[in-house]
């Protein structure tokens, strides 16, 4: 038995007095208001047992972490056809870069950079009757928690300043890789990113990726090959131009968001979420990465 609670306690004492916590994202003005000193962590082991520390129950904006959930939902709806519109290669570029999109004729490198996630959002807008409501309900079901919701202030704030995403969506449209209206797709995308969750809710939601597609309530949403694909994409693309560094230091598939959250998992062992709003230069949570590096180092557990 791994003493997860002892490891979490050690992580907390290691990081709690850290001065340099990185910078809170301010390009979405609403996110700039968050207290940088927050830190939370929740780990769920393969038996469904939870271990937690710090601000693990506090809600934060999951931002790009939502891209994994929209991908999972879209894969369930359209299956392997999805890969005709989005590639699966790491980009080595920041999450919002556009130059590759033009060079590669409107096919985004992967579904976790913004352009790729906007294509996935387009697929959901096409296939869902009430896209925002249906997506939210999907997350609530996977999490086993009916209270998960959007933060409308964050969605509005990003809509007002999301110029690069408007550029990405327009570029995709010009290449014929966006079927719906730019404004409709982006309204959905800004809302999916504005889902608010706690570390506890995130760990519960992502449990299925560590559990062969079966969520904590016992329902199966993805088959084993879909889980393989999504975990592979998280490992190679989940941290953008820092994916190599995350694999090197942490050694787990995972996904970050500019709200300061990170979720990571070890198949058949555990799923873990961290939250610390200060970001490093690459837009990933500075202390979240440090916490997860300590988790895999102290436990000796990683996919490698
Ligand atoms: O589209 C954006 O810029 C944000 N809604 C999400 C970016 C993000 O979280 C990048 N991840 N670290």
Image: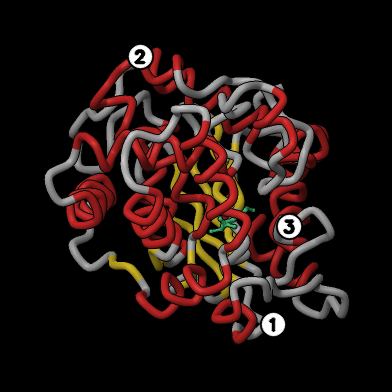
In the rendered image, residue 90, in percent from the top left (x then y), is placed at 69, 27
Q: Which residue is mark 1?
A: 37
- Ligand 1 has an atom within 8 Å of the beta carbon of the residue at disc 3: yes
Quarter of the figure with residue 76: top left
The quarter of the image holding the N terminus is top right
Question: Could you tell me which residue is drawn at 60 percent across and 86 percent down?
Answer: 33
Q: Out of 248 and 194, give the one closest to the viewer.
A: 194
Q: Out of 213 and 51, give the one closest to the viewer.
A: 213
The answer, for residue 294, to whether it is visible in the render is yes
Looking at the image, tell me whether mark 2 or mark 1 is earlier in sequence order: 1
Which marked residue is nearer to the observer: mark 2 or mark 1?
A: 2
Q: Which residue is mark 2?
A: 81
Looking at the image, tell me whether mark 2 or mark 3 is earlier in sequence order: 2
Q: Badge 3, how many Cα within 10 Å: few under 14, some, many 20+?
A: many
Q: Out of 249 and 125, give the one closest to the viewer.
A: 125
In the rendered image, residue 265, in percent from the top left (x then y), is placed at 54, 38
Q: CA distance from mark 2 to mark 3?
A: 31 Å
**Please, is residue 84 above or below residue 186 in the view?**
above
In the rendered image, residue 24, in percent from the top left (x then y), is placed at 71, 74
**Please, is residue 159 above or below residue 180 in the view?**
below
């Amino acid at each position: 038995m791994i003493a997860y609670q002892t490891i979490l306690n050690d992580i907390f004492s290691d990081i709690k007095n850290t001065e340099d916590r990185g910078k809170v994202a301010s390009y979405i003005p609403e996110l700039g208001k968050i207290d940088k000193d927050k830190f939370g962590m929740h780990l769920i082991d393969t038996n469904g047992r939870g271990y937690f520390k710090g601000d693990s129950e506090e809600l934060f904006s999951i931002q790009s972490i939502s891209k994994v959930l929209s991908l999972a939902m879209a894969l369930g709806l359209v299956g392997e056809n999805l890969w005709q519109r989005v590639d699966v290669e790491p980009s080595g570029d920041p999450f919002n870069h556009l130059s590759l999109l033009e060079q590669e004729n409107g096919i985004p490198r992967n579904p976790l950079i913004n352009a790729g996630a906007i294509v996935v959002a387009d697929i959901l807008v096409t296939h869902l009757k009430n896209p925002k409501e249906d997506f939210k309900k999907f997350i609530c079901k996977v999490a086993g928690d009916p209270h998960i919701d959007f933060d409308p202030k964050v969605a509005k704030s990003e809509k007002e300043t999301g110029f690069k995403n408007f550029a990405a969506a327009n570029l995709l449209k010009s290449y014929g890789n966006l079927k719906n209206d730019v404004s409709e797709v982006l309204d959905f995308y800004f809302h999916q990113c504005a889902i608010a969750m706690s570390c506890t809710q995130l760990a519960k939601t992502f449990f299925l990726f560590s559990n062969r597609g079966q969520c904590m309530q016992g329902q199966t949403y993805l088959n084993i090959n879909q889980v393989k694909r999504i975990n592979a994409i998280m490992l190679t693309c989940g941290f953008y131009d820092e994916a190599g560094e995350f694999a090197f230091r942490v050694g787990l598939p995972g996904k970050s968001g500019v709200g300061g959250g990170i979720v990571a998992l070890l198949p058949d062992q555990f799923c873990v979420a961290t939250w610390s709003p200060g970001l490093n230069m690459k837009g990933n949570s500075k202390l979240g990465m440090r916490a997860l590096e300590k988790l895999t180092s102290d436990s000796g557990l990683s996919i490698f």
